[in-house]
Amino acid sequence: MLISIVAPCYNEEAVLARFHEEVQKVSEKLLPLGHDMEFVYVDDGSRDRTLTVLKQLAELDARVRYVSFSRNFGKEAALLAGLRHASGDAVVVMDADLQHPPELISHMVQLREQGYDQVIARRTRTGDHFLRTATARLYYRFVNRLVDVELVDGVGDFRMLSRRVVDAVLDLTEYNRFSKGLFAWVGFPATTFEYENAVREHGRSSWNFKSLLNYGLDGLLSFNSRPLRAALYLGLCLLVCAGLYTAWIVGAALVNGVETPGYVTIITAVTAFAGVQMIMLGVIGEYTGRIYYEVKGRPHFLVKATNVERAEKTEGRTPCTTNKDLIR
C-alpha cells in the first residue's frame, strides 16, 4: 500500500525538517510490511523560508512533493491541494507542526487493514483550559442539533482516508469548504481512537479567537439551512407578539382611555425589533455571500511553485521509491 502524507504548512520553517525526519522513521518501520510512503507538502503562502526548506527536502528525498501557493489561501485550500496531488492508496492528513504525533500513523495502518475507510484520531482535551473545554462542548452540542452531519468534539483533520474517500471528497467542488464536515458527509466505514495532543515545538498557532469564531460559523452554515428557517420562525413569533401587544394596547385604551406615557415602551420595542431584523439580515447575508462566491467559480488556490508537474511529465506518475537508502 502506498501511503500519502498530506501536510499543509504555514510558516513552519523551524519544524519542517524535524517533522520530515519523524515521518521518515515511521516510513522505515512500515517498509518491511510492504507499505511505502510519499510526502505531499503544501506551502500556504508562508512568509518565512518554508518553501526553501521544502525544496531542500525534495532534493534529499525523491518521494517529497511540494506545492506552494501564490499567497495565503487558508488551510481548507491547502488540504484540497494536498488531496488533489496525493496518489496513494491511503492518505494521512496531518499538521506539520508535530502536534499530530507521526508515530500514530502505524496504528492507523493497522486499523485501516481491518477494512475501515476512515481512521480518525480524536484529541483528548487533557491540559486544555477549562473555559475552552466548556465552550467547545457547548458549541458541538448546539451545532449537532442543527447540522446535517455529526461533528465530534476533539476530531479534526488528523485521519487516514482510503482512496475512495479521497475521491469522494474531491468530487465535492464547493468553494466554501469545511473539511471536517465533508469527511463526515461522505460517510463510509469509520473508526475513531483517542490520543493526547502534543505541545507545539516552535512558533505560535495562527488560530486566534477570531479564526476560531469564523471556523465555528463555517461549521454551522456549511451543512444546513436551519438558521434561515429559524429566522422565519422568529419573525412569525414576533408577529404574533406584536399582534397580542396591539390587542392589549387597544383594549387598555378602550377601558382606561388614551394615555400619553409610553415613550420607553415604544423605544424598547423599536430597538428590539431593529436588532432582530439586523440578525435576520445577517443570516440571509451569510448565505447570499456564500452563493456569491460559489457562482463566480474562482479556483480554490493558485500555485506559485511545485515539483509535481515536472515529475508527472517525466515519469507519468508520482515519483515514489522503495529504496531504504533514501530514508535517513
Image (spheres, rainbow, N blue to C red):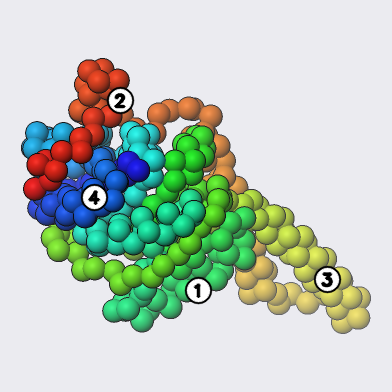
Residue at 76% of width from left, 65% of height from top?
A: 237
Q: Is residue 39 visible?
A: yes
Disc on the earlier residue, 1 or 3: 1
Note whether 287 is above or below 81 in the view shown: below
Q: Position of residue 44 (x, y in %)?
A: 25, 41
Residues at circles 2 and 4 in contact by the CB criterion of under 8 Å? no
Q: Residues within 10 Å of mark 4 (few under 14, many from 20)?
A: few
Image quadrant assignment for residue 26: bottom left
Image quadrant assignment for residue 109: bottom left
Note whether 230 is above or below 12 in the view shown: below
- Closest to the camera, between mark 1 and mark 3, is 1
Residues at circles 1 and 4 in contact by the CB criterion of under 8 Å? no
Task: Quickly name the residue at label 3.
Answer: 244
Residues at circles 4 and 3 in contact by the CB criterion of under 8 Å? no
Task: Quickly name the residue at label 1.
Answer: 138
Disc on the earlier residue, 4 or 3: 4
- Closest to the camera, between mark 2 and mark 3, is 2
Residues at circles 2 and 3 in contact by the CB criterion of under 8 Å? no
Q: Position of residue 256 (x, y in %)?
A: 87, 82
Task: Quickly name the residue at label 4.
Answer: 32
Say which element carries label 4: helix
Task: Quickly name the residue at label 2.
Answer: 317
Which quarter of the rendering shows the N terminus? top left
- Closest to the camera, between mark 1 and mark 2, is 2
Note whether 115 is above or below 141 in the view shown: above
Q: Amino acid at mark 3?
A: Leu
Say which element carries label 3: helix
